[in-house]
Amino acid sequence: MAKKGNRNLFIFQCAVCKAKNFTGSKNTVNNKEKLMFKKFCKSCRKTTEHNEIKLGK
């Protein structure tokens, strides 16, 4: 079974309205670049680009 030590949490933020809609995790050793997905934004009520931002702790 794989270890979860290298995985960090992050938040997806809408590029249009800046609403923080989704959370996720990724392996920061293998994937150093930021993720960007097209997802449905509840605030905009349409599909927009969502960029990765750091999880505030």
Image (cartoon, rainbow, N blue to C red):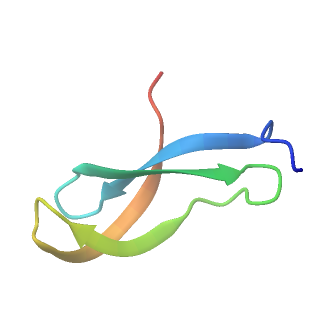
Left or right of residue 43: residue 25: right
Residue visible at 89% across and 50% down in the picture? 1
Q: Quadrant of residue 41?
A: bottom left
Residue 14: horizontal and vertical position, in percent?
A: 28, 60
Q: Is residue 24 left or right of residue 3?
A: left
Q: Quadrant of residue 40?
A: bottom left
The percent position of residue 17, horizontal first and vertical second, equals: 16, 57
Count of number-bearing discs: 0
Residue 3: % across, % down: 85, 42
Judged left or right of residue 35, residue 42 is left
Q: In this view of the protein, which residue sits in the foreground, 53 or 47?
A: 47
Residue 31 vs 37, above or below: the answer is above
The answer to whether 56 is drawn above or below residue 30 in the figure is above
Residue beneath the point at 48% across and 21% down: 57
The residue lying furthest to the top in this view is: 57
14, above or below 9, in the image: below
9 sits left or right of 40 in the view? right
Q: Position of residue 30 (x, y in %)?
A: 82, 59
Task: Determine the residue located farthest toward the front in the rendered image.
Answer: 1
Instruction: Determine the residue positioned at 44% across, 28% down.
Output: 56
Residue under the point 42% across and 60% down: 51
